[in-house]
Amino acid sequence: MTTTTAIKGINVKELTKKILNGDQIFILDVRNTGDFDDWKIEGENVHIINKPYFDLIDSLDPIMDQLPKDQPIYVICAKGGSSEFVAEQIAEAGYDHVYSIEGGMKAWSEYLEPIKIGDLTGGGTIYQFVRIGKGCLSYLVESNAEVAIIDAARMIEPYEQFVSEHNLKLTHLLDTHLHADHISGGRTLAEKVGAEYHLPPKDAEEVTYSYTKLEDGNEIKVGKVLIKVIYSPGHTIGSTSFIVDDQYLLTGDILFIDSIGRPDLAGKAEDWVADLRQTLYDRYKQLADNLIVLPAHYMGINEMNKDGSVSEELGNLYKENHGLNINDENEFRKTVSENLPPQPNAYQEIREMNMGKINPDLEEQREMEIGPNRCAVR
């Protein structure tokens, strides 16, 4: 069998479907070990090993005893080139089902998978767009043919495609805060389709563009559904939450399923700890326990539901999330100021782009976003 017929390509959409379906997946990651340790493909039934490409140029001996004979082998690198070479070598060694993951980790980082969360009482639906390669979550609320998108990713095409396929009109783009871990697509998409772009004013003091202010108590109507605005600072000084249809609480980067937001990405950790505690232990505590929490990120595959979505009732989080059960204020302050992962890659540049201060080209934007999100307290 020749190498041209022995190896196949698999795109990240197909791979995502397999992972969310719970398929057994074996992946060989041929990036440098430091890059692998920082950020890798994860899944409930994903078995992944790492051996850098340069260690495999001359021979596959370092990994031969780890390659399965009875299941497909998926090879990934940074952009898709090195993985093709290694996949061909594996196929030549007698393995029948070998795939190179097209576009590598760059493509993995950019894929969005839409998952239906539920129906809305006024008619309509809410969807969660899962950016599985980066742990970012964005939301599409549709009612009576109108659409609002919350915390849109840089890749706006999946939202445009969804809106077009369902004959909808995009009317509102909302960001819960000024993001530091990923580039927002909200303003770009709003300008492209003539929709209204909303941002918390306390996060927008340095922005270079016009926007509609998100003020506490505001209500935004989308078709027959209301989105209620709740000021909820702590991750940033302007962090804002939304209650959609009195059913769903979109928490941005304030509250996650298995953690809470970090207050330090603008260099204001000491100033914002008290705000974070007040939001989590007072503002949210006054809300209905049966609200479904929909965060802007997730940290690990363990936070996913069976269908790949990420959600949990607020009342259950108050029982199970450690970050919501630190009674001593000093201990809370220590937890959220000391148990922090490294800051996201290029976070300052990302903030400046989201302010409109810089406008790097597409490849630079991709490089800025490489790596996992790091918005949570460990």
Image: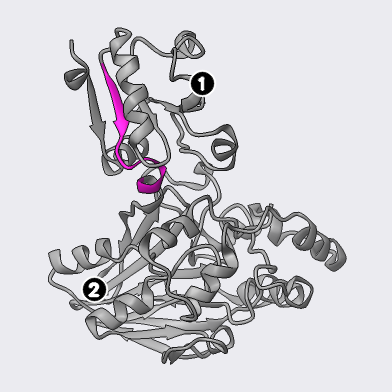
Which residue is disc 1 drawn over? Answer: 55
Tell whether 292 sits left or right of 34.
Answer: left
Asked if the stretch drawn in magenta spans residue 284, the answer is no
Say which quarter of the image contains residue 172. bottom left
Q: How many marks?
A: 2
Which residue is disc 2 drawn over? Answer: 123
* Residue at left offset 38%, top offset 68%: 152
Where disc 1 sits, the SS reads helix
- Residue 190 makes an appearance in the image: yes
Q: Position of residue 311 (x, y in %)?
A: 47, 56
Q: Amino acid at mark 1?
A: Asp
- Residue 176 makes an appearance in the image: no
Q: Give the mark nearer the N terminus: 2 vs 1.
A: 1
Please tell me how crowded label 2 is: few (under 14), some (14-19), or many (20+) other residues with Cα within 10 Å.
some
Where disc 2 sits, the SS reads loop
Q: Position of residue 231 (x, y in %)?
A: 57, 83
261 up-or-down from 273: above or below: above
Asked if the stretch drawn in magenta spans residue 99, the answer is yes
136 up-or-down from 49: above or below: below
Proximity of marks 2 and 1: CB atoms separated by less than 8 Å: no
* Residue at left offset 36%, top offset 30%: 83
Write down the region rendered in magenta.
97-107
Say which quarter of the image contains residue 210. bottom left
Judging from the image, the colouring scheme is one colour
Residue closer to the observer: 257 or 100: 100
Q: Nearer the viewer, mark 2 or mark 1?
A: 1
Q: Position of residue 98 (x, y in %)?
A: 29, 21
Please tell me how crowded label 1 is: few (under 14), some (14-19), or many (20+) other residues with Cα within 10 Å.
some
